[in-house]
Image: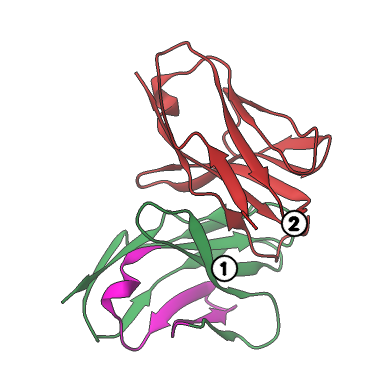
Amino acid sequence: AQSVTQLDSQVPVFEEAPVELRCNYSSSVSVYLFWYVQYPNQGLQLLLKYLSGSTLVESINGFEAEFNKSQTSFHLRKPSVHISDTAEYFCAVSARNEKLTFGTGTRLTIIP
Amino acid sequence: NAGVTQTPKFQVLKTGQSMTLQCAQDMNHEYMSWYRQDPGMGLRLIHYSVGAGITDQGEVPNGYNVSRSTTEDFPLRLLSAAPSQTSVYFCASRLEIAGGGELFFGEGSRLTVL
């Protein structure tokens, strides 16, 4: 069985400061890894994903995540956050089958 | 292109009532799924389908039924609503059956069971 742990339920960050949202996963087989973002009163949207190849993946709005197999982690980072980044972020894992398992989410709050 | 459409957006039920949450996608996606979102618990998979006529249970299937008579539609039925089913429900679909592809989500249906 696969599982995802997001240790931080809430992360407050000052505007233009860097942020890291942590994600650890558990699986006995190779996995696909995802970050989804949920803006207030909306459904989730894909932010970025790791399937294979380069362990560093980037999104179009400045976020990046690095797959670390030895630490079973897929932390999300951004060097400088903006007010518009206020949202809830979900890490998810799929053990290359049809089911996608989500973490409990991290609420990112940007402080002006 | 509407994407994934869920109806209704809001619903209040009394304990014991039944209802159906509708989900339709116009992207010809084979895979469709229903999740519920509860505070502090993230999204949990209720049921999913890998094509017309094929459905399977997810992590929390009890109290819910699904069917997939067409590629486009994947309704979720609550047989006898309970307060524990108060939640926000999301329908999601993707093109491929196997994991790796992007899941497209509807805007959600907020259900309150009194």
Q: Amino acid at mark 1?
A: Phe
Q: In the image, is residue B78 above or below residue A16?
A: above
Most foreground residue, A30 or A60:
A60
- Residue that badge 1 annotates: A34
**Residue plotted at (35% across, 64% down):** A87
Q: Quadrant of the C terminus of chain A?
A: bottom left
Disc 1: which chain? A
Task: Tell me the quarter of the picture where residue A6 sits.
Answer: bottom left
In the image, residue B48 lies at what x, y percent?
Answer: 69, 41
Q: Residues within 10 Å of mark 1 (few under 14, many from 20)?
A: many
In the image, residue B56 lies at what x, y percent?
Answer: 74, 36
Q: Which residues are magenta?
A: A61-88
Farthest-out residue, top: B16
- Residue that badge 2 annotates: A97
Q: Which chain is red?
A: B
Q: In the image, is residue A3 above or below residue B5?
A: below
In the image, residue A19 lies at what x, y percent?
Answer: 32, 80
